[in-house]
Image (cartoon, rainbow, N blue to C red):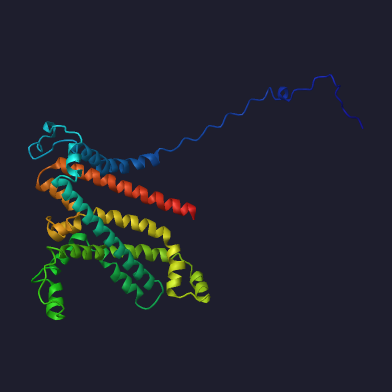
Amino acid sequence: MATSTTAPGAARPDRRDARAGTPEPARRRRPRRPLLPYLLLVPAIVLELAVHVVPMAVGAWMSLLELTQFHIRDWSTAPFIGLDNYRATLDIHTAAGRELLHSFWVTLAYTLLSVGLAWLLGMAGAVVLQRPFRGRAVLRALFLTPYALPVYTAVITWSFLLQRDTGLVNHVLVDQLGLLDDRPFWLIGGNSFWSLLVVSVWRNWPFAFLCLMAGLQNVPDELYEASAIDGAGFWRRLRSVTLPLLRPVNLVLLLVLFLWTFNDFNTPYVLFGGSAPEQADLISIHIYRSSFKTWDFGSGSAMSVALLLFLLVVSAGYLLITNRRRDHA
């Protein structure tokens, strides 16, 4: 059988020469990305700029001007004063600074109590309605009613209920149950804070209930059955099974409730008619009164920018701490 050999010194035939006559394959062109997704994003970007970014930029610029009632018709005549509005409103040694600090502490206490009570009621409702039973769908619908009602309708109804002489609350407490000797004022004085808190919790707890109820649907029943076999009671199962598995939901829920409540303007404005008592002077109402009652839009804009920065710092710190704990776990 003949075999072909190549001499050691002979040059080997180049394979590329054999393919010299064949044309090289054309380079593959990258497919062009379609423009349709970007075109569909244009309306959303334009609306975001018009609704949020541009007003924020205008508000930041207004905070640097002495924009009072004398210059409101023509902003170009308002003198530029730099950070003077911030110094006047954030200095606790001035009357304006002390009023803003008082409003801040009232808002912080109101927010913490409202978020805590709303989460507690929502958690209790979600746990009670976790297991199927007759009438559960009706209870779910009733629990979500406060969240489904328009805010103005709900708060106006509460304002009628809390009236001193004709309100249903005093009628039940004084006339029907006899728990009080005199009809208290619920919308002025020290009671105004607690009235506002009740209305806020009534409005917010259905949202917490809805989120927590949705989170509980993802908890496997096998975990509860296994813990029950091991002898764990209700509180032990709640502490060792339910709460740890609801941690991702609670992290987002608490942050959202905090931002909503701290920024809440509709509830106190409708309940007190735009002039909240000192005990219920939330920072949103304080900024509104400083801007539209005294016509000092420069100071009001400075307070708004300071509030925005505070909420951004709180949100960033909250997310940073929770993410570190999650990574560590």
Query: Is residue 283 in view?
Result: no
Q: Position of residue 56 (x, y in %)?
A: 24, 41
- Report the number of numbered marks: 0
* Residue 256: quarter of image: bottom left
In the displayed structure image, the side of residue 80 where residue 14 appears, left or right: right
- Spot occupied by residue 255 in the image (x, y as percentages of width and height): 34, 55
Whole-percent x, y for residue 182 in the image: 9, 74
Left or right: where 288 falls relative to 50:
left
Residue 141 figure quarter: bottom left
Name the foreground residue: 26 vs 169: 169
Please name whichever residue, 188 or 123, is drawn nearer the observer in this view of the structure.
188
Left/right placement of residue 169 relative to residue 123 reads left
- In the rendered image of this protein, does residue 168 appear above or below residue 19? below
Whether residue 201 is situated above or below residue 39 in the rendered picture: below
Quick one: quadrant of the N terminus? top right
Measured as percent of width and height from the top left, residue 168 is found at: 14, 73
Name the residue: 61% across, 29% down: 25
Which residue is pictured at 24% across the width and 44% down the height?
306
